[in-house]
Image (cartoon, grey):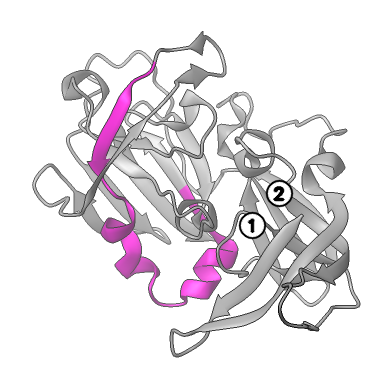
Amino acid sequence: MVYKQAVLNDSGQVAFTGAYRYRGYSLFDLLNPFVLEKKNAKEFVPATDVYIIIENNSGDRVVFSWAEIFLGHNMHQVLIATEQADVEPYKVKVNYPKDSVWKVVAANDLFAYRELKNPSRIIVKSFDRKYYEINRELKDPFSPTVNLVVDDSLMGVIDTLNAVAPHARYHSVFYGMGMGYHGTPTFEGPLLRPLVENFLAKDGAKWMRTGIACVVGKDGFRNIFSVSELFNRVDQVEPILAIPENPKKSGYYRLYHPSAFYADFSVRNLSEIYLFRE
């Protein structure tokens, strides 16, 4: 795996450390032999609300969604790295600083907020911070607004009038975990980042390390994304609040993230985005 290690410093400038090749243990390979037994399986069967905490003995931690490791387009992009070497340019000599300890490295991240030295414990959790009733037989599933909740406080409401943000348009090959192929719909709507970034500005680095977004439909169906998975992407492809062709059936908004392999991670009739830190 290769990775360019940099972070934003306190003045907002990029602090570059080095470009590296890493070898180590894929988090996918470490967790794959174990059978996932969800604590809340009787209430909510899908693994779309599962996330992973990695911590060290100093009390530092980073988080990843289950989908980042097992249900995305690119597998094996999170390593517990045991070796590193420079990626050497051919015109100049470099000797970037090396670590002598094992560490977590996330190759899909633009900035290295989720680097964690000396990892000692991996915890797998299903979402339990708030109760959402599951009701897939709603007579009226339409949700005209989306609540923005941060650490249990309602910070704002997105409706059809105040979602002022640049729009993006994505083509897709829609494929569900249960029923497979669902055609090739196009999704268009406002970018999510401008609608939530003010709430993440304070302690932004901590949000990127340990932030989680639970995205919930009116029927209680939910997905978990890490905040870095949404907004700290090396490919800089970000989620939108897509406005369906028939909003009364699937909206008014549905979250669409092109990085998600499965259609199940496009929550329709979106009613709440619950942001918290572990």
User: Looking at the image, can residue 193 be seen?
Assistant: yes
Vertical position of residue 58 compared to residue 131: above or below: below
Q: Is residue 154 visible?
A: no
* Residue situated furthest bottom in the rendering: 11
Residue at screen point 44% across, 20% down: 174
- Residue 23, located in which quarter of the rendered image? bottom right
Q: Residues within 10 Å of mark 2 (few under 14, many from 20)?
A: some
Residue 14 counted in the magenta span: no
Which residue position holds label 1? Answer: 63
- Label 2: state its secondary structure: loop
Decide which of tag 1 and tag 2 comes sooner along the chain.
Answer: 1
Q: Which residue is mark 2?
A: 77
In the displayed structure, would residue 12 be above or below residue 242?
A: below
The amino acid type found where label 1 is placed reads Val
The C terminus, quarter of image: bottom right
Residue at left offset 23%, top offset 18%: 249
229 sits to left or right of 186? right
Residue lying at the far front in this picture: please name it: 91
Q: Measured from the top left, where is residue 245 in percent x and y?
A: 19, 22
- Where does residue 244 sit, x and y in percent of width and height? 23, 26
Residue occupying the point 70% across, 55% down: 53
Q: What amino acid is labelled 2 in the image? A: Gln
The residue range painted magenta reads 184-213
Residues packed near mark 1 inside 10 Å, few (<14), some (14 to 19) or many (20 plus): many
Q: In the displayed structure, does residue 146 sit left or right of residue 263? A: left
- On the image, the x and y values in percent for residue 151 come to 43, 61
Look at 68% across and 42% down and name the residue there.
69
Q: CA distance from mark 1 to mark 2?
A: 14 Å
Name the foreground residue: 128 vs 166. 166
Is the residue 203 above or below the residue 237 in the image?
below
Q: Nearer the viewer, mark 1 or mark 2?
A: 2
**Image coords of residue 171 (percent x, y):** 36, 29
